[in-house]
Amino acid sequence: MTIMKYPICATCGVQYGEPREDCPICLDERQYVGWDGQRWTTLEELRAAGHRGRIEEEGEGIIGVGAEPPTSIGQRALLVRTPSGNVLWDMITLIDDDLVRQVRELGGVSAIAISHPHYYGSMIEWAHAFDAPVYIHEADRQWVARPDDAVRFWSGDTLEIGDGLTLINAGVHFAGGQVLHWRDGEDGEGALLSGDILQVVQDRRWVSFMWSYPNFIPERPRTIRRALRLLEPYNFRRVYGAWWRRIVYADGKAAVQRSYDRYLDFALDDGRPA
């Protein structure tokens, strides 16, 4: 495939539509500029450095799509395979002929949806490779680094993008932060693909809620409460986080609620003297 030399921020891995001196996504308080200053790369350079695609099953009907060695933040995407078409959830920076071929063999991509701006990666390259729309919530429009007709902005609380596949604007981490609910996942018990809007932590019985992960700034309790209200109608056994095997494997909906209860217990002052 022919890839133009669009600049990619080496820290967050987001591809821009034209050269620039700074990366607004990394200048934002939720991210950071690399300790060696703003650095740029390209897909050609990443491929020349030996980065290759990684495809592995992460769950029944859910295939992990990542890079080895990882690039930038290191997240992997998830390909949700359904009879009505596959949805690529979240995004990576790498794309090459071999990765496209492997995804095509799995049924291709009918639609793309991304949880938040830190994971926009090379979304336009992927959209063009599969002729697939990219669903981004309207509240995060300002962060799209490479504008393109493939991007479809939506508004409101929920949007169905396939049979039993619903985007939910949780609003955690970013105002447009979204999660994907798959009604038919996990033998009909449901799956929630959360990126790091609801971050599956090292103890995979729990999730966390942060405004900034690298800078350890907690999310506002009122924002999390709104997210849980929106999730209430949806059942899900598993919660798929943003990295390989970062999965709450059982009792996912209850895990989210107890995680919020624990979060409040530590976040709110109980009125006792220090």
Image (cartoon, rainbow, N blue to C red):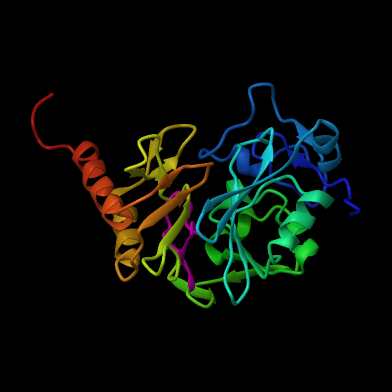
Looking at this view, is 193 or 35 the one in front? 193
Q: Residue at x 86, y 34 (%)?
A: 48
Q: Farthest residue to the left: give it.
A: 272
Q: Is residue 178 magenta?
A: yes
Q: How many marks?
A: 0
| 96 lies left or right of 59 | right
Looking at this view, is 80 or 19 the one in front? 80
Picture coordinates of residue 230, whole percent (x, y):
34, 66
Q: Residue at x 63, y 73 (%)?
A: 85
Q: Is residue 166 magenta?
A: yes
| 54 lies left or right of 228 | right
Q: Using the rendered view, name the quadrant where residue 236 is placed.
A: bottom left
Q: Residue at x 24, y 39 (%)?
A: 267
Q: Using the rendered view, name the quadrant where residue 268 is placed.
A: top left
Picture coordinates of residue 168, whole percent (x, y):
44, 66
Q: Quadrant of the N terminus?
A: bottom right
Numbered range of the magenta stretch:
165-181
Residue 57 can be seen, yes or no: yes
Residue 147 can be seen, yes or no: no
Picture coordinates of residue 92, whole percent (x, y):
66, 47
Q: Using the rendered view, name the quadrant where residue 132 is placed.
A: bottom right
Looking at this view, is 190 or 8 the one in front? 190
| 192 lies left or right of 112 | left
**Residue 10 to residue 137: above or below:** above
Q: Residue at x 31, y 60 (%)?
A: 228
**Residue 105 to residue 174: above or below:** below
Picture coordinates of residue 75, whole percent (x, y):
58, 42
Q: Farthest residue to the top: give it.
A: 36
Q: Quadrant of the C terminus?
A: top left
